[in-house]
Image (cartoon, rainbow, N blue to C red):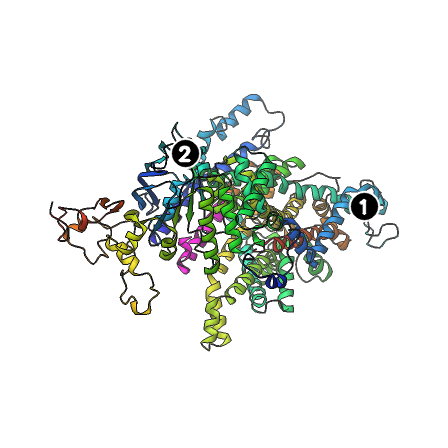
Amino acid sequence: MLVYLTKRILYTIPIVLGVSLVCFLLVHLAPGDPLVSVLPPDASEDLKQQLLVIYGFDRPYWEQFLRWVGRALQGDLGYSIASGRSVTTEVLRAVGNTLILASVATVIGFFFGLLFGFVGGYFRDSWIDKTASALAVVGVSVPHYWLGMVLVIIFSSQLNWLPPTGAGPGASSDWQPDWAHIRHLILPAVTMSVIPMGIIARTIRALVADILSQDFVQALRAKGMGELGVFLHIVKNAAPTALAVMGLQLGYLLGGSILIETVFAWPGTGFLLNAAIFQRDLPLLQGTILVLALFFVLLNLIVDLVQSLLDPRIQRS
Amino acid sequence: MSSALISPLDRGGPAQPLLTVRGLVKHFAVKGSVFGAKAVVRAVDGVDFEILKGETLGVVGESGCGKSTTARLLMHLIAPDAGTLIFDGEPVGTGGLAMREFRRQVQMVFQDSYASLNPRLTVEASIAFGPQVHGIATRAAIDRAHGLLDRVGLDPSRFASRYPHELSGGQRQRVNIARALALQPRLLILDEAVSALDKSVEAQVLNLLLDLKEEFGLTYLFISHDLNVVRFMSDRVAVMYLGKVAEIGPSETVFDKAAHPYSAALTRSMPSMDPDNRTEEAPIAGDPPNPINPPSGCRFHTRCTFAEAPCSATPPTLAAVGIGHKVSCLMHEPGSGHSKAAAS
Amino acid sequence: MALARSTAEIAALPPVIDKSEGYWASVWRRLRRDKVAIIAGLVVLALILMAIFAPYIAPADPLSGRITRRLRPIGTEGFPLGTDELGRDMLSRLIHGARMSLLMGVTPVIIAFGLGSTIGIVAGYLGGWFNTIAMRTIDIFYAFPSVLLAVALSGALGAGLTNALVSLSVVFIPPIARVAEAVTTQVRNRDYVEAARASGAPGFTIVRVHVLGNVLGPIFVYATSLISVSMILASGLSFLGLGVRPPEPEWGLMLNTLRTVIYSQPWVAALPGLMIFITSISFNLLSDGLRSAMDVKQ
């Protein structure tokens, strides 16, 4: 057990290094001059050289990479070219907002996904199952940015029940647990929850159907156990997988929130990423992507560790 | 022993063994811990034997004793860690006998008849693949496939263009035999080739194998855990225990007058046809020891009823105790210190 | 086993299969019985035909519009699906949009299928250090959520069709390579591959005859399941302004420019997204049907 845990944690190190390398290379993939957005069009060659040295762009790539990693380890991701502010500060503020959105969406998606999945797997091939399966397919096939627009059309533009954009009243970007802010959270969170809902429903349905067909369920019924008892056994057996899928989905939503944040003008990492791309603010782009990817790696690690604690069979595979 | 036809490929005459195996070793690394302290499974740990021309050499032993690994080593499907193979007087893999030519002369039938046929190829395509690889034109290879199908009892007009899933287990194993014969090999390795078949089908396939041996002048290495089948098929028998040969000799000798306590226990465990002659006690206690850390000295001493102090210290050597009969046991080694051994 | 049977027994046997059915023929036979998959397949076919024959089907020019007739509602005379913010005919733009949207959604999967399955099959068949290097590199790309990787790459490369296609291809190579590696490793250890090696066949011949036929099917089905995701992501990139540029009719881009008018003509604005949805769900259902038609033991 300890061996597996150690191995799994050690295995994360090369992944983290690789992820940093990819984030670093992204900037050098970009065509054109990295300074293009800060330089006035008539900048002198002297000024240009000075800035290159200040940002360290004149050093060899490997040296730039090592310095960048070294500083990142100390929590310094450089300064935004557009705003001049620390990338770390900007990213951390945005991550908080995205985390709220993604967590609420995961919880909603998880609840309905479990419901549909269990009902579908339990009453296999009944009309309930077919409806639940259809909803799950819709969930994974719908372009969620469009779904967000449709929800805005219905609940904001037509019914005027909920605010269409922003995280709170008056373009506030600091989230607070009051009703005004919750109202702003509802539409983006529901939109976002559709993705994990479909995936969780599909996974759970297959899992429950599989468990139900196994011999031990027959044995439990033969022993005279009631349906509730059988149901609890199934829950116990399905829980590790369900939790794993939920953890991974949270990671996907954190990293993939850009489209939904754009639709709802939600002041999170996606919004930041959008700004960084269109202002060609490369340090900000690099830093945001690195933080999101590391979050995802960390979540993967936690999911694997928790799962191996819950289900000792995992480590053998 | 069936009379071996003189093959045009024959070099040393009938007295020269077809295949001589010397000191064959294969250890598999198993990942033990994070920091690379690797444990090894001693799957095959110094195996010597010979296969004579035209005979059937049976190989028996419990699962995990290294029978199948030996077969795969002989086929060079996995590379041995040490050991030499001499095929009809020529060392394999050297200038004398190229690997490709050796492979053509030695073929194998696997246990799982379904897994050993490509599900996307028709029966005739599977059989014709080997000859095509060795440069035979497609048409001629297909003709050869049809001839072999007919020979193994499957009407080519009905079976040639079928797919494996459309055949029964016995039919598939006949196809596998035809596929192995398509390269006109001299040695056929049958690795549990009939073990997965129903008893009635098994008997038919065994009889087919005997007929084919006669007709094509084949030599068989017959691996099985089923002692009755091995006794029915084999001229000589090798008994393996934990990666080593415990005893090898003529079939009747090994089955009726086994010299090694392990062989004796194995043969006693065969169910008797005579109800008055039932086996009462379990002949061998427990499971075989872990091959990662095999017992010291004689590997069987942990389960042997005759074990004495020297057995856990001195590894026995495989030595002759009769004509063509070798055994690896201190009781038969003069001067070994075992109370039943002769003084030197 | 028919060898030892009497004539009476043989007469009672089920009829002999005269013509053996090949693998793909049996897949098609099963797929034909799956009504949902067939309908989805027909929708996909219709979308492809619509894209090919767009200039002949579309009633108007998708690029020219007049500002005086902008934002007409659905059902307007002459403009059955209304007009957009520049007064262009929505129906014609949606029909023409199928060209770019399908191209952007399907091309990356085709490229990734080619490259990813090559990497995966070679890594799976060779094993050893090549496998380790290839698969560990792929693990690194796996550490990025797909949307993030697509946006990051095309954001760094800059907007444009080619860059969007490159980014999406890079996103789909790792998952396809992983599946390809897994199925190839499985097939490589089958006895029939061992038997082929035992016959002395060279590695390339074994891969061509015994491996490809058994792994391309599962990899292909997996790749088709990615088309739906790719459609959503590709249009998503255009929606963010990272794909094709205006005035090109492309569903994601149309959705983006119409976003400003959801208060005046909400249902017209929602139409391009509906097209993406229909396309994506059809590919998804078709892929599901294909998978269950292929996933039959024996």
Residue A33 on image: x %, y %: 58, 28
Q: Is residue A71 magenta?
A: no
Q: Chain of mark 1?
A: C
Spatial CA distance of label 1 from label 2 is: 80 Å
Write the residue at 18% across / 51% down: B331
> Residue beneath label 2, please?
B10
Q: Secondary structure at mark 2?
A: loop
Residue C114 on image: x %, y %: 60, 39
- Looking at the magenta stretch, what is its main secondary structure? helix
Q: Is residue B303 left or right of residue C200?
A: left
Q: Is residue B218 visible?
A: yes
Amino acid type indicated by mark 1: Ser
| Quadrant of the image containing the N terminus of chain A | bottom left
Residue C111 on image: x %, y %: 62, 39
Residue count near mark 2 (Cα–Cα under 10 Å), binned few <14, some 14–19, many ≥20: some
Of A152 and C50, the residue lying toward us: C50
Q: Are marks 1 and 2 on the same chain?
A: no
Q: Secondary structure at mark 1?
A: helix
Residue range corresponding to the magenta coloring = A292-317
Residue B60 on image: x %, y %: 34, 52
Q: Is residue A138 left or right of residue B323?
A: right
Q: Chain of mark 2?
A: B
Instruction: Name the mark nearer the viewer: 1 or 2.
Output: 2
Residue count near mark 1 (Cα–Cα under 10 Å), binned few <14, some 14–19, many ≥20: many
Of B329 and A83, the residue lying toward us: B329
> Residue beneath label 1, please?
C92
Q: Is residue A272 visible?
A: no
Amino acid type indicated by mark 2: Asp
